[in-house]
Amino acid sequence: MAYQEILTVLADPTRRQVFERLRGGPSPVKAIATGLPVSRPAVSQHLKVLKDAGLVEERSEGVRRIYSLRREGLAELRDWLDSFWDDALLAFKIEAERTHRHNTRARDVNE
């Protein structure tokens, strides 16, 4: 899934809360829904959207469904975010080299 779609999926505050609750490890819907301002069926719908986006996975344990994060689902988003860091580092490198050349020339003139 493209990072834009992942951002769209995670833009919903309730869905983001559902997603963040899975940080602590695999959980059934009942545990995920506890304390949220929406019903368990609504949480299940949010989990379906997250699953369709590749951000969570589910497994069956008897009659319960256990949900967990798919960290690989965030890979494209992370790559996109990392590209900003790469750009910042490149800009820093260029500025540092420019400053170093300028300081070296100034020192050579003064000697």
Image (cartoon, helix red, strand yellow):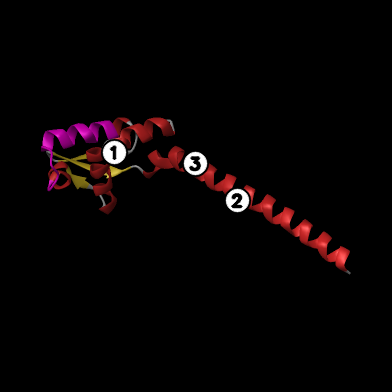
Q: Nearer the viewer, mark 1 or mark 2?
A: 2
Q: Are marks 1 and 2 in contact (CB under 8 Å)?
A: no
Position of the C terminus by quadrant = bottom right
Q: Are marks 3 and 1 in contact (CB under 8 Å)?
A: no
Which class describes the residues within 10 Å of circle 3: few (<14), some (14-19), or many (20+)?
A: few
> In the image, residue 96 lies at what x, y percent?
69, 56
Q: Residue at x 29, y 38 (%)?
A: 57
Depth order, front residue of 43/83: 83
Q: Identify the disc placed on residue 39.
A: none
Q: Could you say whether the residue bearing mark 1 is in a helix, strand or loop? A: strand
Amino acid type assigned to the residue bearing label 3 in the image: Asp
Q: Earlier in the sequence, mark 1 or mark 2?
A: 1
Depth order, front residue of 55/93: 93
State the CA–CA distance, disc 3 to disc 1. 21 Å
Amino acid type assigned to the residue bearing label 2 in the image: Leu
Residue tagged 1:
57
> In the image, residue 69 lies at what x, y percent?
31, 44
Q: Is residue 64 left or right of residue 21?
A: left
By secondary structure, the bulk of the magenta-drawn segment is best described as: helix
Q: Residue at x 69, y 50 (%)?
A: 94
> In the image, residue 105 lies at what x, y percent?
83, 59
State the CA–CA distance, disc 3 to disc 2. 15 Å
Q: Is residue 39 left or right of residue 57?
A: left
Residue tagged 2:
89
Is residue 89 shown to the viewer in this render?
yes
Amino acid type assigned to the residue bearing label 1 in the image: Glu
Q: Earlier in the sequence, mark 3 or mark 1?
A: 1
Q: Nearer the viewer, mark 3 or mark 2?
A: 2
Q: Are marks 3 and 2 in contact (CB under 8 Å)?
A: no
* Span shown in magenta: 34-50
Q: Is residue 33 left or right of residue 93?
A: left
Q: Identify the disc placed on residue 79.
A: 3
